[in-house]
Image (cartoon, rainbow, N blue to C red):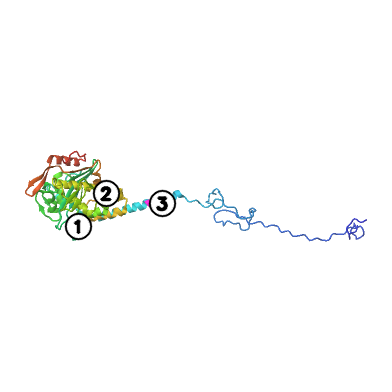
Amino acid sequence: MNDWPEGWTDDRDGTGRAGAPRPESPRVMRHVQRPVPRQQPRYGGPGDDGWNEGQVYRAAPAGPPPPPGPREDDGHGYDGYRERRRPDWRRRITWTALTLVVVLLVTVAGTYLWADSKLRKEVDLEATGLAPEGERPPATDGTTYLIVGTDSREGLSAEERSELHTGDTGGKRTDTMMILHRGGSGSTLVSLPRDSWVTIPSFTGSVSGNRIPEQQNKLNAAYAIEGPELLIATVEQNTGLRIDHYAEIGFGGFAGVVDALGGVEMCFEEPIKDKNSGADFEAGCQKLDGADSLAFVRQRYQEAMGDLGRTKNQQKFLGALGDQVASPGTLLNPFRLYPTMGASLDSLIVDKDMSAWELSQMFLALRGVQGKNGTQMNVPVANPGFATDKGSAVLWDEEKSQQLFDQIRNDEKITVTDE
C-alpha cells in the first residue's frame, strides 16, 4: 500500500525512480500591504508650522489630534498646544481708569483756561493808591472781597427792562455793596448801606485824570463820581480793610445767572408785595426765576427798616445763590454748570488780579456764610435817619463798627452784632 498522495512515488533519492520524492512545485505568496504610519504633529518652537514634513516621531492614534489641554509654558511663550491666552482684566481696568483720569484732567484744565480768559478784568486795585496817603491798608490773613450790585441796564432791551421793572434811567449806580471775608474763622458777609455817611478821600482818576477833593457824602456817591476805583478807596479808608478782590454785576447779569441755575428757592414767613420792584410773593417756600429774584432783592416793603431791611434780604438771597452755585448738583452737572459759568462770566466785572479760581472761592465763601461758622450782618448803625445836606443818611456806630472791622482784619471770630 502506497501512503503518498496520488501522483507521488517513493523516489527518495530524486532520480525519478520509484520510491524517490518528487519536488514541490512553486507557490505564489499572497501580498500583504503593511500600514503606513500617519504623520504626527510635532511642536518645536517659534517658526514651526506645527507639522513634521515626513519625519515620524511617534505613531499617532486614529482620529483627530487630541484637544489642547493645560500645559506648562516652555519659557518661550508656547505652552504645548498653543493654548489661547486669557484676557488680563486687571490690566484692562487699569488702562481704562488711567484714560478716564487723563480725559478728566484735560477737561478741567480746558474749562479753567476758558473761564479765566472770559473774565472781564477791568478794575485796577492799585489805582486806589492815588488816595491821600498813597498807601493802602496792609494785607491780612484770609481774603476780603468787595461785592457790588449796580442798577446798570447794559444789554437789556426795552421789553426786558419792562419785565425786570428796572426803569429807563441811564448810567449806573451802586444798588448793593457788601464786604465778604473768607478766612480761618469762617465766612463773614457785611452789608454797607448805600446811604452810609462816610468820608470820600481826595482822589485822582487813573484814567480820567479827574481830581476829586475830600468830602463827606453818601457811600454810593463814590461810585457815581469816579467809578469802582474811588469806591474801593473809600471803603478801604472808612473800614481799614484791604480789599483783595472786586466783583460787580448789573441787573441783567444778575437775572441771567439765576435763570441759568434754573431758579433759586426762597422761603418767606409772610407775603411780600412791592409795586415799585414788581415783587409779589405768597408766604412759604418757592423757586424764584431771574425777574422774581431781582424784584425781591430790590424791594423795600419793610417800611420801618427801609434800606437796612433790604440789605438783610440781599444777604439772605446771596447766601442761597452761593449755596446753589457751589452745590454738587451744579458742579457735577455740565448741563447746569456751563450755562451758569457762561452767564456769570459774561456779566461780572472783576479786578485785574481776579482768577477763575478766586472767583470759585468767592462763591464757596458765599455758601459758607449760611453755615455754623458763617456770619451775615449789617454794619452796626447808630442813626439810620441821620439828617445831612445830601438828605437822610445812615450813620455808623463808630465803636461797634470799628470792633467789627478789627475782628475781620485779624481773622477772628465775629462777636459784634448789628442790633
Q: Nearer the viewer, residue 273 or 186?
A: 273
Q: Which of marks 2 and 3 is in front?
A: 2
To which residue does mark 2 refer?
324
Residue at (32%, 52%) from the top-left corner?
Answer: 333
Q: How crowded is mark 3: few (under 14 residues within 10 Å), some or many (20 or more)?
A: few
Q: Do the residues labelled 1 and 2 touch (CB within 8 Å)?
A: no
Amino acid type of the residue that numbered disc 3 sits on in the rendered structure: Thr
Local SS, label 1: helix
To which residue does mark 1 refer?
163
Quadrant in which the C terminus appears? top left
The tag earlier along the polypeptide, 2 or 3, is 3
Q: Do the residues labelled 3 and 1 touch (CB within 8 Å)?
A: no
Asked whether the viewer can see residue 145, the reply is no
Of all residues, the one furthest to the left in this rendering is 389
Amino acid type of the residue that numbered disc 1 sits on in the rendered structure: Glu
Q: Nearer the viewer, residue 371 or 20?
A: 371
Is 345 placed left or right of 68 in the picture? left
Indicate whether residue 386 is drawn in magenta: no
Q: Which of marks 3 and 1 is in front?
A: 1
Asked whether the viewer can see residue 311, the reply is yes
Residue at (9%, 45%) from the top-left corner?
Answer: 386
Asked if residue 138 is positioned above or below residue 290 in the image, the reply reads above
Q: How far apart are marks 1 and 2 (CA)?
A: 24 Å
Main secondary-structure element of the magenta-colored stretch: helix
Local SS, label 3: helix
Q: Start and end of the magenta stretch?
A: 96-100
Asked if residue 393 is positioned above or below residue 12 in the image, the reply reads above
To which residue does mark 3 refer?
96
